[in-house]
Each structure stands twice: as C-alpha cells, then as structure tokens.
C-alpha cells in the first residue's frame, strides 16, 4: 500500500474566513490557539497544547509527502491567568483564533471537532478542543494520539475535507455485498467526503481544491525532518481603546449627530468595565479630547459621553488622526501592541491615507474602521483586514441604524459571553403615526437591559409594556434633547417574555430603537448570533453566500426564523430568508448555521445585518453536527483485539427554546463588477439527492434549486441513472435518461419527489446510481448533483435457530467495522513506524 495514502487514511480513522494562516516556505505560521477565559488557569494545559502541535507536525510532515509542517504557533491565554512569562498579545483574539480551547457544551461532550460550513475545499471556521480532552490521557485510548487527532482536524480546518467514516451509516449494500464505510477511500460509500466533495478522495481535494493547492504542487520535499514548532504564549490584558473621530466640515449636520449618538451607545452599554478609553478628533489638525481613562463607574462613562464632539469644520487629515490616536495609546505603557483604534470618518480626505496605512498596519494595534462615504479610501478596508479589526460602512439614512449597529459590534471576546452585550433588537422606520414592535427577552439574558430610542425631529410619546403588563412611559425614561435620544434602563433582571413598544408621533420623522442586554446568569452563556459573508471582496465570478450562526454555548439553535438584509452604499436593499435545510448554500441541515446565496450584488461597499426571532415558533437547542474525531473502538495487544470502553453518552434530545429576538451586524464587504448588472448564475447544485427502490419502483427526493442559484424557480430537471458511479459522475450525459416530462420544478427550497419504473425488472442485489441537473430560463445548467445510490435487497427465509436475523446482521456489520478499523490502525502505525525508523537510521 502507498504509505502516503496510509497516512491520509490514518487521519480519517484514528485522528478522527481567510483564516490568516500562512505557509512560510514549507512551514505553517500564524496559527493562533486561544484558551477561553472560562477555563481556569492550568499551566499543564499549555504544555499539552505544545505537545499536541509538536507531535502533529511530524505526522503532517510524513502525511503530505514530507512537504509541510507546523513552524510557528501562538497560544493566547485568558486575561486573568498569572505569569511573568507571557508576552503581550498583538492582534490575536479568541474570536478569530483557528483553534479554540473551551469548555464543552454538556457534561460529557469532550469530543474534538471542527466547525465547517463551507463548500468542499473551503477553509473551516475553527477547531474546538476541551481542556478535559487535552489534560486527561484516557481520551488517547478513545480517539488515538492527540497529534493524529490534531492533524485530522487540521485537514478539516485548512483543506476543507470531510470524514470518510460514518457514524450514521457504518455500512452499506453494494452489488449484493455488505460493505463497511471504512477508512480506505471508496467513492461509493455513504460518507460526507463523497457527499460534499463529489466522490473525490481526500488526497485529491487537498492537492487540487484546497487553499494550499498551488503551494503543495510546487513545494519540494524537505531534505531532512523539520525542527519542532516554535511557540509564543501571549496574553491580552483589559481593553485599551482610542476613539478617533472625524470632525471635518463634511461631517457637520446629521453625520456628526449620528457619530455622537453611536459613540454614546458604545460608551454607555458596549465597552466593558475596567477597559481604558481615550478620545481623539481630527480635521485640519488633530486633538486629544480625553487621554486614556479607566471605565470604573457610570459617572466615568457619562464624563466621556459629554466630551464627544458636537460640531465639525475644516478639512480631513486622516493620517494626523491616526498618529494622534497612537500617541494616546502609547501613554499607558509606551507601546500600542494589542491596543485598539476605532477610526470613524466620512473618508473625504485631503491627505492620502495610503501613505500612513502601512505603518499603522505594522504597529501591532487592532484597527476597526467605520466609513460614512462611498468615496472612503480603500486603505480603510485594508487596515481593518490586516490588523484583526472590522470594517463597516454607514449610510446617512437614519432608519438603517447602521452606525449604532457598527459600534454595538465592536466587542473583543475572551470566550466568556456572559460578560458581553447582546443586541436583541435594532430597527428603524419613518412614520407620522405609530411605530410598534415586540422584543422577546429569553431566559438566557435580562441583565443590564436598555431600550434606546432615537428620533429625528420632535420628542414623541413612548410606551413600553413588560410581559406582565407593567407600562413604562417617558416619566420612567431619560431624555437627552440635544442627542435626540430617549433611554429606558430596566432595573435588575428584565422579566422574560415579550416586551412591546409603541412610539407615537404627529410629525413625519424617522425613529430607531436599539435594545441591548446581557446574560441573566454568570454560568449560562446567552444565545448569540454571528454573521458574515464567504467573501469580503467579490468580482462577481463566484457566488456570494450569507452565513448566520445561531448558538448557545456551542449548541446549535435550530428552526429559528432568520432574515438577512444586505444594503449597498448607493441605497439598494435586498432582504432574504436564510435557511438551515442542508440544501443550496447550506452545508448541513439542523446545525444552527443558516445560509443563502446573495445574488443581487451591486458595485460598491455593502453592509450586512441579520435579524433572528422565535416568537411562538418551533425553535430548539440541538446536538452539534460537526466534523469530529472518530472514536477508536479497540486496539491490538499481542495479536489480541482489546475493546475500549464506550464513549460517554451525550444527550441527543433537542431542548425547547422560548421566545427570543436577536440582531447581528456583519463586516461590510466590497463588490467590484466588470459591468453594471449583477451576474446571472445557473441553478445551484443539488446536494441532497436520495434514492430508494421499492419493488420495481425508484423514488427520488431532493430539495428544489432556484432559477438563480437557490432563489426563484428552475425551468426543468434532467435525471439520469447508471450501473456505474464513475461513468455517471464523469460523464453525466452518457447516463440513461429518466422521463421527466411530468416533473414541474417547484420554488427553491421546496421538497421535490419523483417516482418512476425502469424499462426492466430490478433484480435482488442490484445497485443503481442516480444524478440530477437542473436548467434555468437561459438554458444554463447546474452542476451535476451528488450521486445517489439505491440497492434492491430482498431478505430470504429466516435461518433455522435465528430468532432475530436483523440483530445478527447488525452485530456482524459492527464486528466487521471494528475489525477493519483495527486493521487500518495496525497497517498505518506500522507503515509510519517503518518510515520514521528508516529516516533516522
């Protein structure tokens, strides 16, 4: 057996965003491993992480033709850990880490996994390890060595491959034989790798489809084994933030007021206690309005609020503003490493910010940029992208509430979401009558709950009703006439349930309402929403996808109603419902990741906002569905198979979720089309085709694609079948045609079914393969669907002495799977040991 193949199989059996990771020569660098602040200090944990990555580096080197290894990794430890040996963090953060060390979402769920929700070959989101897994060596028995597990998960994270084993379908029937869904690649096996990657082998995806495909094809093998990885352990202390605010003449009027309103919201409700904040303004020159000040009370917060600029004049010199901001940040300890700049401008500059952007990027500070104007410099996007910050755009239109949403998103998570603000609502409207709505406060939030209403012209009448019927009016609220803001702070913990608001005005004016809260209990993380696009820049050649992850303590929240609004800086707006149905843009059904293709793209900068709700619906907490490390059922000692104890049981019963509402803002993205109209895409590839043979009838089921990717209605379907999977996959048009004259496509997302008889009787033991293509009105065809297979199995008479033949078949297959996994283990380990011994002789 090819030893290279052995090691690819080994990952899949035993080890069972641009991420910022880079290849420096043959070595991976900029690998960020972050420990959640929920994890108590244990220096042994750092040692175990280093051991895992070091061991994994040698497995990686052997597996990938001796071409790559782990060269450098940074370990980010929580702020409360004590040691003189930790370096100061630069742009590293828990939220953007590639490997996260955090507690499990249930008492027994310690299995390592990788969060993936992109297409085959796309990088995953992160790898999750629990402290228990790293510290307790008994897990080595259950999952194999940590180094192998790490490399297995790395394959998911970096190269976008999927598992070739299957927990749900450990065996399948093929041409009269029972086959195990095993470690050696078999393009007929019912596993995720075949389903997601078009029946391609793991090796093929890594070298032909992954982000590293070009490097892996050109890199030469190392002449000798690589050195161990180098590690840097860093720590981020309390946040140090400088607001750098534009007060040039083009900001005068509505913009300077919106800046003041949003910055006020940030200082009152978003920035955490004990953080240090400074304020700088810039126009023709730059000024420090406040040096770094520790947030130690509400009085301090209000002092900072009162210092926010209220007038604007002069030209726009952004480089002066940046320079002044850095000077403020340096005052606490002489450097800006890990400090933050929140840089807001309309971008209509008289200086060339591209000249000072490179030094800002190299400073070690995190720079988040907010731009009002459609002419804002490209350097603003670049600074945010390269320093770990976030880029937002904001329109002058008040009801979009974009600037408030942007400031509300400027948190820096340490992994403990119980201490972070959660945005329950953010909505705006223009009316001369009533503006009504409902905000649902669920059991996971309620502390520090605030309702902030901003009006445009005249002070309105406001009524807010609690779930039990208590009415709050203006007498219970604070009113700032200059800021045109009315605020209700709910004392204590807000009552769970539906809070209803009504705003009445006789003047035609705009309103926005923003509702923020925090976790109700220190030990119960709240439901959170994270949203982003699959591309931060698009030229229209590849489809854009919107993702929204709804979860609570890593548990998926399913069956929620999720809507995304994508708004261009020129004013066009597109709203679409995101789905968690495992079809179209969505990778897995019921994993709490809601997705949709965004087809109405227009030139320029675009903003993303997601609203999630469950009001009287069927929302549930579900079991996480991720690419995880496989359980090793046994091992061999002196030729005897020794079975491991079973994995700890994990509850798979979904739990109900009460009414809740959430909003989330994603980083803005840029579209630059060659023409002025959005590209036309064919129907999306069908990924969930299934087939079943009942007597001589074939039943096919799938989710309908759209006219344009997963939106609209396709024109027609073409269905073909074959006895040969490879022929159908490689040459769809040569398959046997199924008559689809009676099949009329339904709207995208609908369930499609088609039953038919073939022109011959189907014999017992026969396996057939099926595939579908769809076509739109422009005669553009989709990619060929996943290949569905079906076998006709007729059970004979019950053998004498067998009381339950089905049970015996199950036992037989399980035994076969265990034996195959053990054999694969022996072959892989033996081959690895021989290669290692020969190399060091």
Image (tube, rainbow, N blue to C red):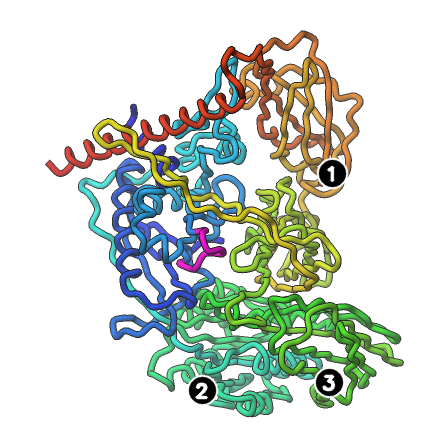
Q: Position of residue 778 (x, y in %)?
A: 73, 33
The kind of secondary structure the magenta stretch mainly shows is loop
Residue placed most toward the observer, 570 or 64: 64
Which residues fall within the magenta stretch? 101-109
Left or right side of 349 for 150: left
Query: Could you tell whether 470 is left or right of 353 in the image?
Result: right
x and y percent of residue 779 in the render? 72, 30
Q: Nearer the viewer, mark 1 or mark 2?
A: 1
On residue 292, the disc is 2
Q: What residue is pinned by disc 1?
A: 750
Q: Which residue is labeled 3 in the image?
A: 484
Q: Secondary structure at mark 2?
A: strand
Label 1: which secondary element: loop
Q: Nearer the viewer, residue 384 or 263?
A: 263
* Viewport quadrant of the N terminus: top left
Provide residue 775's location: percent of width, then percent of height: 71, 30
In front of the other: label 1 or label 3?
1
Quarter of the rendering occupied by the C terminus: top left
> Residue placed at 44% from the left, 70% from the top?
366
In the image, what residue occupies the spot 66% across and 49% down?
598
CA separation, marks 2 and 3? 28 Å
Above or below 753: residue 606: below
Q: Is residue 102 magenta?
A: yes
Tell me which corner region of the image, top left, top right, bottom left or bottom right, holds residue 435: bottom right
């Amino acid at each position: 057996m090819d030893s290279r193949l052995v090691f690819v199989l080994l990952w899949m059996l035993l080890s069972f965003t641009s991420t910022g990771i880079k290849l420096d020569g043959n070595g991976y660098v900029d690998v960020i491993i972050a420990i959640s602040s929920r994890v108590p200090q244990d220096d042994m944990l750092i040692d175990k992480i280093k051991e895992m990555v070091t061991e994994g580096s040698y497995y990686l080197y052997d597996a990938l033709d001796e071409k790559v290894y782990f060269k450098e990794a940074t370990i980010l430890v929580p702020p409360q850990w004590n040691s003189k040996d930790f370096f100061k963090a630069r742009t590293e953060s828990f939220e953007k880490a590639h490997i996260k060390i955090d507690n499990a979402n249930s008492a027994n769920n310690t299995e390592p996994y990788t969060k993936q929700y992109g297409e085959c070959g796309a990088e995953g989101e992160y790898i999750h390890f629990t402290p228990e897994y790293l510290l307790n060596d008994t897990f080595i028995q259950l999952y194999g060595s940590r180094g192998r597990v790490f490399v297995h998960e790395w394959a998911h994270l970096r190269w976008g491959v999927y598992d070739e084993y299957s927990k749900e379908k450990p065996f399948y029937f093929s041409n009269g034989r029972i086959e195990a869904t095993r470690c050696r690649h078999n393009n007929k096996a019912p596993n995720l790798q075949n389903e997601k990657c078009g029946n391609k082998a793991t090796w093929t995806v890594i070298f032909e489809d992954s982000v590293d495909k070009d490097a892996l094809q050109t890199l030469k093998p190392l002449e000798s084994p690589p050195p161990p990885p180098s590690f840097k352990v860093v720590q981020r202390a309390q946040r140090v933030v400088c607001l750098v605010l534009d007060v040039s003449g083009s900001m005068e009027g509505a913009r300077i007021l919106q800046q003041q309103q949003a910055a006020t919201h940030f200082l009152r409700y978003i920035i955490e206690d004990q953080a240090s904040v400074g304020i700088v303004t810039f126009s023709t020159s730059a000024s420090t309005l406040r040096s770094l000040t520790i947030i130690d009370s509400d009085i301090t917060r209000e002092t900072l609020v009162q210092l926010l600029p209220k007038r604007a004049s002069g030209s726009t010199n952004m480089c002066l503003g940046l320079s002044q901001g850095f000077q403020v940040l340096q005052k606490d300890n002489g450097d800006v490493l890990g400090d933050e700049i929140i840089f807001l401008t309309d971008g209509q500059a008289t200086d060339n910010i591209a000249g000072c952007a490179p030094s800002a990027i190299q400073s070690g500070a995190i720079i988040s940029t907010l731009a009002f104007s459609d002419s804002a410099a490209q350097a603003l996007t670049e600074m945010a992208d390269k320093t770990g910050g976030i880029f937002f755009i904001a329109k002058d239109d008040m009801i979009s509430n974009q600037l408030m949403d942007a400031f509300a998103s400027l948190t820096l998570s340490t992994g403990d979401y119980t201490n972070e603000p959660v945005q329950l609502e953010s909505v705006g409207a223009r009316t001369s009558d009533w503006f009504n709505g409902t905000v649902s406060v669920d059991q996971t939030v309620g502390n520090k709950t605030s309702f902030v209403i901003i009006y445009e012209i005249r002070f309105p009448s406001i009524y807010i009703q609690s779930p039990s019927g208590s009415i709050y009016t203006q007498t219970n609220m604070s009113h700032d006439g200059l800021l045109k803001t009315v605020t209700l702070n709910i004392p204590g913990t807000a009552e769970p349930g539906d809070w209803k608001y009504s705003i009445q005005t006789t003047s035609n004016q705009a309103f926005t309402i923003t509702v923020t809260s925090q976790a109700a209990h220190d030990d119960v993380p709240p439901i959170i929403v994270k949203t982003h696009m699959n591309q931060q820049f698009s030229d229209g050649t590849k489809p854009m996808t919107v993702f929204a992850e709804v979860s609570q303590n890593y548990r998926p929240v399913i069956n929620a109603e999720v809507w995304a609004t994508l708004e261009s800086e020129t004013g066009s707006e597109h709203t679409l419902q995101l789905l968690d149905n495992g079809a179209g843009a969505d990778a897995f059904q019921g994993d709490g990741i809601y997705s949709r293709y965004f087809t109405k793209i227009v030139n320029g900068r675009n903003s993303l906002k997601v609203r999630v709700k469950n009001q009287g619906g069927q929302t549930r907490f579900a079991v996480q569905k991720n690419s995880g490390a496989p359980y090793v059922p046994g091992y061999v000692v002196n030729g005897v198979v020794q079975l491991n104890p079973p994995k700890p049981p994990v509850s798979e019963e979904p739990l109900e979720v009460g009414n809740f509402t959430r909003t989330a803002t994603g980083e803005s993205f840029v579209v630059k089309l060659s023409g002025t109209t959005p590209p036309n895409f064919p129907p999306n590839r069908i990924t969930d085709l299934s087939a079943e043979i009942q007597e001589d009838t074939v039943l096919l089921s799938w989710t309908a694609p759209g006219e344009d990717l997963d939106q609209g209605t396709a024109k027609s379907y073409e269905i073909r079948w074959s006895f040969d999977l490879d022929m159908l996959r490689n040459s769809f048009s040569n398959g046997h045609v199924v008559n689809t004259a009676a099949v009329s496509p339904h709207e995208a997302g609908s369930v499609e079914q088609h039953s038919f008889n073939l022109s011959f009787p189907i014999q017992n033991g026969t396996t057939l393969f099926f595939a579908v293509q769809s076509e739109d009105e422009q005669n553009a065809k989709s990619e060929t669907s996943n290949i569905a297979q079906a076998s006709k199995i007729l059970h004979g008479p019950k053998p004498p002495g067998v009381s339950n033949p089905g049970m015996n078949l199950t036992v037989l297959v399980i035994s076969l799977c265990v034996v195959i996994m053990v054999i694969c283990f022996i072959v892989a380990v033996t081959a690895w040991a021989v290669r290692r011994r020969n190399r060091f002789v």
